[in-house]
Each structure stands twice: as C-alpha cells, then as structure tokens.
Image: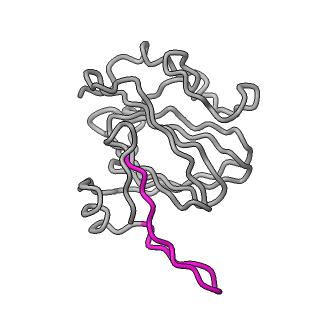
Amino acid sequence: MNVEPLAIPEVLLITPPRFSDSRGFFSETFSARRFREATGVSDAFVQDNHSLSRQRGVIRGLHCQRAPHVQGKLVRCARGAIWDVAVDARVGSPSFGRWVAAELSAENWQQLWIPAGFLHAFCTLVPDTEVIYKVTGDYNKASEAGVIWNDPDLALPWPVAADEVVLSDKDQALPRLREAGTLFTY
C-alpha cells in the first residue's frame, strides 16, 4: 500500500495494491491492520456508504458531522471518476479554511483518508459514477453540518462549470464557512 500525505498532511492519498491477470484483478481495498501500520491511523470504521451519481457534475458536499458524532472517511471510487476534496474546518488549525483534493477513479484505484475535523465533498467527472466510503462514526442527523460548495472564501476550483453543477436541495441551502459557526476546534 502506497501512502502519500497531501499539502495538509493529515489527509492521505492511499493506493492499495491491485493484482491483474487474464481473468481481471484482485485487490485488498482495506485491511485494518495494514491501514493502521501504513498510516498510523487507528480509528475504527463502523459503517460503509455507497453512492451512485447518474450525471457528470454531481457535487455531494461539503459535508461533515460535528461532535459527538464526528466521522473520518476513507473514500474510493469504484466506477467512474470523481474530484474529491477535503477542507480543514478546525478553528485554530494552521491550515483552517485550506483545502486539498485528488482525482479518484476506478482506473487509478486511489483512496483518500479524510480525518474528522474536515469538510468533505466530491464532484463526479463522468456519468454513472459509484463512490464507496468507510466512516468512523455512525450517521447522526442532529450532528450533520455543511458549507456551500461555491463559498467564495474557499474558492474551490471545481472541475465543472457552475451551470453544469447538480446539487441536492439540502446542499444548495448550506451556509458559507464563515457563517457556519465553529464546526471543530483544533
């Protein structure tokens, strides 16, 4: 397993090995022991989520869960491709309000570890994209929070034009980061 810290070193780009032959391929996409040894992260995963986005330009996020139901996420793209982004939402952090991103695809087989304290979103780059992600905390509706995808203070360089973006009603109504209050403390 290859592990690469990004510009915000708590966010990790992970590439599990994939073994191919004439039949196809095999990959151990997650092993708790190997993940802990390679990353130093010992958080336990409690839930797996799987989404299908039918169109290019679907943005899901920027989402998080506040205490006491925080979630770290291990995200991978099983079909298609996404631009995956993590925004540091920890007030007092040296990287507060900064972001890192990576393209995750079925082809490149990479995963992104996003610890608790970060907002998370992805944008589909092709139709019929499937994303699978593990989380370290159970979903809790009262703890969910988020920030609008096009917050000008974040200035995220989304890989699709604004008029191509497909959002849920809930994601269209999210506040800017400066209006969201203290989501996390460093």
Foreground residue among 67 and 153: 153
Q: Identify the residue at horizontal 45%, vertical 57% (top origin).
A: 48
Left or right of residue 12, residue 107 in this image: right
Left or right of residue 26, residue 172 in this image: right
User: Picture coordinates of residue 22 (x, y %)?
Assistant: 65, 86
User: Picture coordinates of residue 73 (x, y %)?
Assistant: 40, 48
Q: How many marks?
A: 0
Point out the residue furthest to the top here: 179
User: Picture coordinates of residue 112 (x, y %)?
Assistant: 44, 50
**What stretch of residues is rendered in magenta?**
12-29
Q: Quadrant of the N terminus?
A: bottom left
Instruction: Determine whether 152 is above or below 137 in the image.
Output: above
Q: Identify the residue at horizontal 45%, vertical 61% (top origin).
A: 15
Point out the residue furthest to the bottom here: 22
Colour basis: one colour
Instruction: Determine whether 117 is above or below 73 in the image.
Output: above
User: Picture coordinates of residue 145 (x, y %)?
Assistant: 43, 29
Please check the rendered image and state whether residue 13 is part of the magenta-colored stretch, yes or no: yes
Q: Identify the residue at horizontal 47%, vertical 34% (top origin).
A: 63
Residue 119: image quadrant is top left
Q: Quadrant of the C terminus?
A: top left
Left or right of residue 8, residue 86 in this image: right
Left or right of residue 53, residue 115 in this image: left
Residue 169: image quadrant is top right
Please check the rendered image and state whether residue 87 is part of the magenta-colored stretch, yes or no: no
Foreground residue among 118 and 140: 118
